[in-house]
Image (cartoon, rainbow, N blue to C red):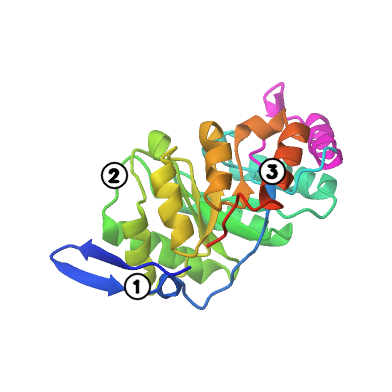
Amino acid sequence: MWYYYIIKLEDSFIDYSSEKQYKVSAASVSMEGVLVALAIPFRDGKVDVEGLGRHVSSLVKEGVNGFFPLGTTSMGVLLNVEERRIALETISENSNGLPIVVQVGSTDWSTVVETVKLAEKFNAEAIASIVPIYYKPDYDTIKLYFSKLNQLTSLPIFIYNIPGNVGFNVTPDLVARLIKDGVSVGGVKDSSGDIGQVMRFVEMGLEVFNGSDHIVTLATLVGVLDESAEVFCATNTAFNVLFEKFVNSNSVTNP
């Protein structure tokens, strides 16, 4: 399916006659199904290794398709490097080889760098990151941040868009501009809850993870093949069945 966009960037217009022009020749990843936004349990102020291991193992048995640790549900931004290491090691040891997409974003660059190294060490399929937070970054800051991330790793990089927490919405227009300017974008995890925005990301030909519980069904209907939300920490079996019915029926059109 082909689309035509005219995207306004500052004072000029750039025409995109094909969704393929949004893509770059970079490392990519293709996943499908439920990637659980994991909760990281603590006990007595430390990561509960035993509890986390049991939790991951139980989700594997329920048939999930992968894991998205160190994001919002994991309280990832609040975890230090050692806590992140323990969590990722435990998840890796109990994930039965399922794909792991590690959210590396933090409030400081040194933690980001170390988390990227940990993601590679524990064989992550890809990494994801929120945009720099608190100081309301402009376009140049976001471009520099994701360009530097690309210099750190050959893993695909997903932009994790969660405007309700970060205070900044990464729009399809902004992602298109990043790609036009040579930034490698493997895909987007969108937790805006805006189904229209999710549809535009799908139409761009990007790999899209939906992170909003309340639009899970709608997102699947518009072509999102990856769902990553906190609800799956507890209710997986029913959704796995529902998801398989959707993707195996004619009700889902994959752009």
Residue at the image position 43 percent from the left and 62 percent from the top? 146
Secondary-structure class at tag 3? helix
Regarding residue 40, the answer to whether it shows in the image is: no
Q: CA distance from mark 3 to mark 1?
A: 33 Å
Q: Which residue is mark 1?
A: 180
Where does label 2 land, which residue? 136
Task: Determine whether, in the image, residue 229 is placed left or right of residue 5.
Answer: right
Q: Which mark sits nearer the N-terminus, 2 or 3?
A: 2
Residue extending farthest to the bottom is 25
- Residue 163's tag is none
Residue 194's quadrant in the figure?
top left
Q: Amino acid at mark 3?
A: Phe
The residue nearer to you, when weighing 150 against 109, is 150
For label 3, the crowd category at 10 Å Cα-Cα, with few meaning under 14, some 14 to 19 and many 20 or more, is many
Mark 1 or mark 2: whose residue is earlier in sequence: 2
Q: Which residue is mark 3?
A: 243
Q: Residue 70 location, x and y as percent?
A: 60, 42
Residue range corresponding to the magenta coloring: 36-61
What's the residue at 73%, 60% (across, down)? Answer: 123
The nearer-to-camera label among 2 and 3 is 3
Which secondary structure, mark 2?
loop
Dot 1, crowdedness within 10 Å: few (<14), some or many (≥20)?
Answer: some
Q: Residue furthest front?
A: 250
Q: Amino acid at mark 1?
A: Lys
Say whether residue 163 is left or right of residue 189: left
Q: Are marks 1 and 2 in contact (CB under 8 Å)?
A: no
